[in-house]
Amino acid sequence: MAEISPEAARPLIFDFDLLDRPLLEIEDRPLKELCFAVFDTETTGLLPHKDEIVQIGALRVLNGRLIEGEQFDTLVDPQRPIPEASTRVHGVSDDMVRGAPVIAKAAAAFHLFASDAVIVAHNAPFDMAFLRRHAAAAKVQWDHPILDTVLLSAVLFGASVPHTLDALCDRLDITIPTALRHTALGDAQATAEALVKMIPMLQALGFDTLGEVIAQTRRHGRLLEDLNPVDNHGGTWQAGSKT
């Protein structure tokens, strides 16, 4: 397998009962009232149709702030050798994943962690493609609303600027410790910190609700696909929708 450079480690791939407030549809809820599960994965390679997850990390954001102690972090046994080039990027080796849960168990556990949340990731189509491929084995449905910080960055800063995680963190004055970069929990932490900083910026532009923000991200569909299904009435997401 060819060596994976840090900047090339996440190719752009074209292709949510939340807080128990039944009087409002999820898309009409203000961003600061929502619970977010911000996650990242590390993998054996860059092909979601055949490579495998080796690590999942996630944190919760609630009421516009990171919740201390609310995190998910697991290694995953890919049931195949991890290429040395991939290990050089994320640091996960064959020895480290020996005895770790397989993807069906790990994905089911993460699904439980994210069961009441809007899912957030940086370049979500990449990570979600892995999870959706194993949805049947994990006996779950990934029918959460999804926000992508690549698209949120495009909404706030324009499509023409770089939207890598490093570029976004530089723009928002977020430091990713070198030892944590390209670890699932470390990159999830950086993505969550970026989300916390971008929520008030989106609100300052008048995009206060989840539905309003998703509508804006869809304007950047040429950059990256929005993963939220559209109903027949033009809305964004409804409880029980299939993905």
Image (tube, rainbow, N blue to C red):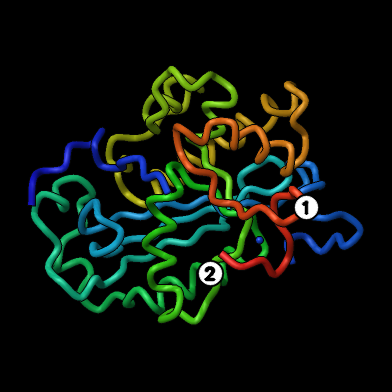
Marks 2 and 1, how far apart at CA: 28 Å
Q: For the point 26% across and 33% down, which residue is it?
A: 7
Q: Which mark is residue 111?
A: 2
Which secondary structure lies at badge 1? loop
* 191 or 221: nearer the viewer: 221
In the displayed structure image, the side of residue 119 where residue 11 appears, left or right: left
* 121 or 177: nearer the viewer: 121
Q: Is residue 53 above or below residue 223?
A: below
Give the label, 2 or 1, closer to the camera.
1
The residue under label 1 is 233
Q: Quadrant of the image for the C terminus?
A: bottom right
On the image, the x and y values in percent for residue 152 come to 56, 32
In the displayed structure image, the side of residue 157 where residue 82 appears, left or right: left
On the image, the x and y values in percent for residue 54 come to 28, 63
Q: Residues within 10 Å of mark 1 (few under 14, many from 20)?
A: few
On the image, the x and y values in percent for residue 176 come to 38, 33
On the image, the x and y values in percent for residue 102 come to 32, 77
Query: Does residue 54 appear in the picture of this structure?
Result: no
Pointer 2 or 1: first along the chain: 2
Which quadrant of the structure image shows residue 132?
bottom left
Q: For the point 51% across and 37% down, which residue is it?
A: 149
Q: For the point 73% across and 65% down, which residue is it?
A: 239
Q: For the point 58% across and 63% down, which residue is it?
A: 114
Q: Is residue 117 above or below residue 76?
A: above
- Single out the residue that lies furthest toward the right: 23
Are the two marked residues, 2 and 1, in contact with CB atoms closer than 8 angstroms?
A: no
Which secondary structure lies at badge 2? helix
Looking at the picture, which amino acid does disc 1 mark?
His
Query: Does residue 202 appear in the picture of this structure?
Result: yes
Q: Is residue 114 above or below residue 46?
A: below
Looking at the picture, which amino acid does disc 2 mark?
His
